[in-house]
Image (spheres, rainbow, N blue to C red):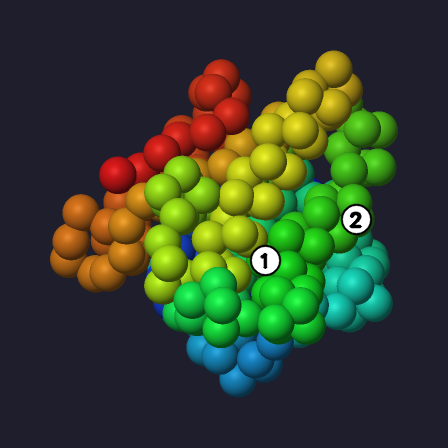
Amino acid sequence: MNKKLIVVVGAGPGVGNHVARKFGVNNFRVVLVSRNQDALSQYVQELSLEGIEAYDVVADAANPVSLTEAFDQIKKNYGTTDVLVYNAAIVKDGKPTSETAESLVTHFKVDVAGALHSALQVIPDQVEQKGGTILFTGGGLALNPSADYGALGIGKAAIRNLAFSLAKELKPQGIFVGTVTIAGAVAPSTHFAPELIAEKYWELYEKREENEIVYS
């Protein structure tokens, strides 16, 4: 297996799949992870038609057991994860006072805890090979909170903190951790088109300098 492997948790027609495509055209094998098998099959077919070696694994980002099983399957079938991209989040509006402790925890499971759990699945192998990359999808709400997206903003602030703290811990072991903080609404044919944002993930991977790119 000469090609490196990228795993994208939170595959979808926006940022997730475009990041997968960017790495795929640069000689990576791709594994897409999400809850929907039918959608995953379609995504893999689209990438395969472009000459990208792509596979899919079903998992629920809110469920640690499901994620563990998925990464066990990935390691068994495709090898060590060289690059992990965590792109899963519950994108839902709601003022802070409309949330409850339970709803906030539900958000946190996907928006933050799933990111940490996914990272924990690949870190041991990356430490052993003295190299690897972990990238998180952040959001501008971490920097400029909105009253209309209370829980999402809290999650993006938390995943940004996770990225920075994890980066400091893992840097001595050769592992780079970064986040792309997307300060706007992702939409085709705009400045926030997913293919343009995907370039920033590749930039973080290649340069390994700053731990955050704010895309605004």
Identify the residue position indicated by label 2 in the image: 121
Which x, y percent locates residue 67? 75, 63
Q: What numbered label is drawn on residue 111?
A: 1
As drawn, is 128 to the left or to the right of 198?
A: right
Query: In the image shown, does 107 or 206 lie closer to the viewer?
Result: 107
Discs 1/2, front: 1
Q: Where is residue 81, by image quadrant?
A: top right
Instruction: Give me the residue at 83% from left, 67% from top.
Output: 65
Q: Disc 1 residue type? A: Asp
Which quadrant would residue 13 be assigned to in this image?
bottom left
Binning the other alpha carbons within 10 Å of mark 1 as few (below 14), some (14 to 19) or many (20 upward) gives many
Which quadrant holds the C terminus?
top left
Name, please, the residue furthest toward the front: 97
Contact, mark 1 vs mark 2 (Cβ under 8 Å): no
Question: In x, y percent, where is residue 123?
Answer: 77, 38
Label 1, label 2: how many angstroms apart (C-alpha)? 17 Å
Residue 52 shows up from this direction: no
Q: Earlier in the sequence, mark 1 or mark 2?
A: 1
Which amino acid does the dot numbered 2 rest on? Gln
